[in-house]
Image: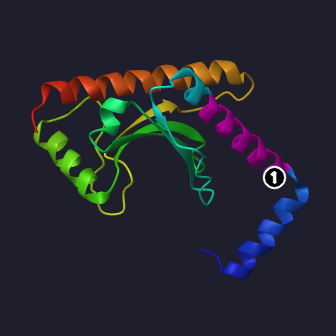
Amino acid sequence: MIPFHEAMSEYRSQMEHGVIRQAYRGLMEYMMDLRVHFERSYPDYVVSGSIYPGYMDMTYFSCTPESLHLQKLKIAIVFLHETCRFEVWLAGMNKRVQAEYWNRLMESNWSAYPLAAQLQGVDAITTHVLSEHPDFRDLPVLTRLIEQGVLQFIADIEEFLSKEQP
């Protein structure tokens, strides 16, 4: 890792080009539009009031059906900056809930989606890649792809939890 002052010099240089600023602004606008899309399309879901922009590591918002919200779970639609991909995550409302559901899935030999390898320092119980290489040239198509993946992920989680006893 390079010293902070050298990183800031590179940051300034990249910002002067303007491309990173333009891409970041476009990404934040798309994430806000995606959040509004879910909020309008699924009025029964609990959708966060804003997006979490992150520290250029991840940007996300939550979009959770009432059935999972009542179990203190949440669904996060996540953009990972380093890999430039979209994922959907199942997470707990707090660390205790997260650990409880992670253990339940682990003990059940859950295999539909990968479980987090560990709980310490991890924000997700299980994850699924929605778009490995998102095509930002056609945002309505990207939105449909993300939406379909999120809905399938939610359906799979709900189906498992309806069959599994606490």
The residue stretch that appears in magenta: 19-36
Image coords of residue 153 (percent x, y): 37, 27
What's the residue at 84%, 49% (across, down)? 19
- Picture quadrant where residue 73 is located: top left
Q: Nearer the viewer, residue 38 or 124?
A: 38
Does residue 150 appear to the left or right of 133 in the view shown? left
On whether residue 24 falls in the magenta region, the answer is: yes
- Quarter of the picture holding the N terminus: bottom right
The one of 76 and 128 positioned closer to us in this rendering: 76
Label 1 residue SS: helix
The majority secondary structure of the magenta stretch comes to helix
Residue at image coords 30%, 48%: 116
Q: How is the image coloured?
A: rainbow
Residue occupying image coordinates x 31% and y 30% = 67
* Mark 1 crowdedness (10 Å alpha carbons): few <14, some 14-19, many ≥20: few
- Residue 122 inside the magenta-drawn segment: no
Q: Quadrant of residue 107?
A: top left
- Residue named by callout 1: 21
